[in-house]
Amino acid sequence: MMLDRPVGQEPIRFHAPHMPPSTYDAVASALGSKHLRAGGRFSRKARALVGAHVGHDRVFLTNSCTSALEVAALALDLGPEDEIIVPSFTFCATATAFARKGARIVLADIDPNTMMVSAETIAARITNRTRAVVVVHYGGAAARMDGITALCAHHGIAVVEDAAQAFGSKQTGRAVGTAGLFAAYSFHETKIISSGHGGALVVNSDKPVLRERVEELLARGTNYPAFARREVSHYEWTSVSSSFEMPDLNAALLYGQLKHTREILFKSRAIWAFYEKRLNRLPVTILRPDEATQTNGYSFAFLCADRSCARRILEKSEQLGLGLQSHYKPLHLSRFAGQILAGHCPAASDSWERLIRLPVHMDLCAEDAGRICDFLTSELG
Ligand SMILES: *Cc1c(COP(=O)(O)O)cnc(C)c1O
């Protein structure tokens, strides 16, 4: 069988950042203003758009989602006595931010129909040392938050949402990223909206002390925000922090993209629906958002019946340049697991090597999406 890519055909990209003219205009304007560091005009504009999305103004732009999670970990004042529950099936940043504070990372298993934690898998890990649960919203879908927030409120545990992939998704009519005490979005180049590297921390509590604490952490551990408001005559070191803010130059890129959020979501969801329609009769488990959730369309993924099938499809896709990808090796199977982690996660162990993701981005044309579906249908049908 002829497996190589037809001559002259470019490989299909898995990701491609969207750069409409508005991004070039905003970046040129930021360069012209000579305000490239954090806190300039484009930071304010981009922040206002993220704020409009979540429905309040306690939104802080960071240089990554990882940094946003670190600020959340610092604001929670965690120590070595504390346990943090984190899904095993995630990117290591979800755990690293909390592990750096010395907290003990306890891994929770996933529901293999969603690849996300549920109130049940979290409840199995709660002890009297649990201080926080980090929920990862996978692939543009979202973990069901009502049960999780009720469980955590009952135990007095903070909820942090790693919504890196979920900007634009909704659950029960609200933006995903508004249910936990903190939520973190990523604007990394591989996410649905991007600023190269970037992120945002959302603080879903209106307690003034919490806002002040987050502002000081973002000011590299100083009371600079009070100084800027002329409430103190000098700013000074107030706590241990680091440099987490998004530079204005990146905020300009972010602003240029955020202005196109509606069309980016529209196209991503259309691609998602196209794949779903073409592939729903194949013998695979498509990861679907539940009935309360509307995906942003960021990712279309399915589980093959077994891992040898997934491996075969990924290898052939590689030769054909179709852009299919696998995803995370679960944290409990990682080389670093023995150092800090606890928890046996059989569902994550069983499913991660069966997972396949399809390309979704603004440059993907109908012909390429059709080629991918034809290939999968001939392999699996
Ligand atoms: C991308 C991603 C991150 C890290 O985001 P950065 O902005 O690159 O730091 C963290 N968690 C999840 C689930 C992600 O997908």
Image (spheres, rainbow, N blue to C red):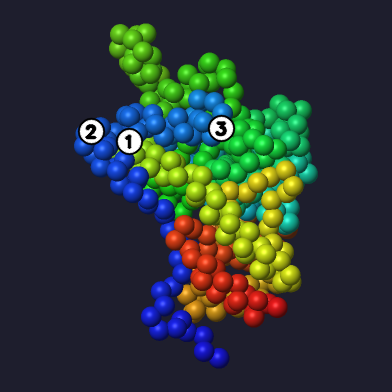
Crowd tier of the residue under label 2, counting other residues whose Cα lies within 10 Å: few below 14, some 14–19, many 20 or above: few
The residue under the point 60% across, 76% down is: 374
Whether residue 360 appears in this view of the structure is yes
Q: Kindly indicate the quadrant of the structure image that contains residue 149.
A: top right
User: Where is mark 3, residue-wise?
Assistant: 54
- For the residue labelled by badge 1, is the local secondary structure a helix, a strand or a loop? helix
Q: Comparing marks 1 and 2, which lies closer to the viewer?
A: 2
In the rendered image, the quadrant that contains the N terminus is: bottom right
The residue under the point 23% across, 39% down is: 31
Q: Tell me residue 36's x, y (percent).
A: 27, 35
Q: Name the kind of residue labelled 3 in the image.
A: Val
* Mark 1 and mark 2 residues within 8 Å of each other at the beta carbon: yes
The mark tally for this picture is 3
Q: Tell me residue 229's x, y (percent).
A: 36, 13
User: Where is mark 1, residue-wise?
Assistant: 248
Spatial separation of the CA atoms under disc 1 and disc 2: 10 Å
Spatial separation of the CA atoms under disc 2 and disc 3: 29 Å
Q: Name the kind of residue labelled 1 in the image.
A: Asp
User: Where is mark 2, residue-wise?
Assistant: 33
Query: As displayed, is residue 329 above or below residue 82?
Result: below
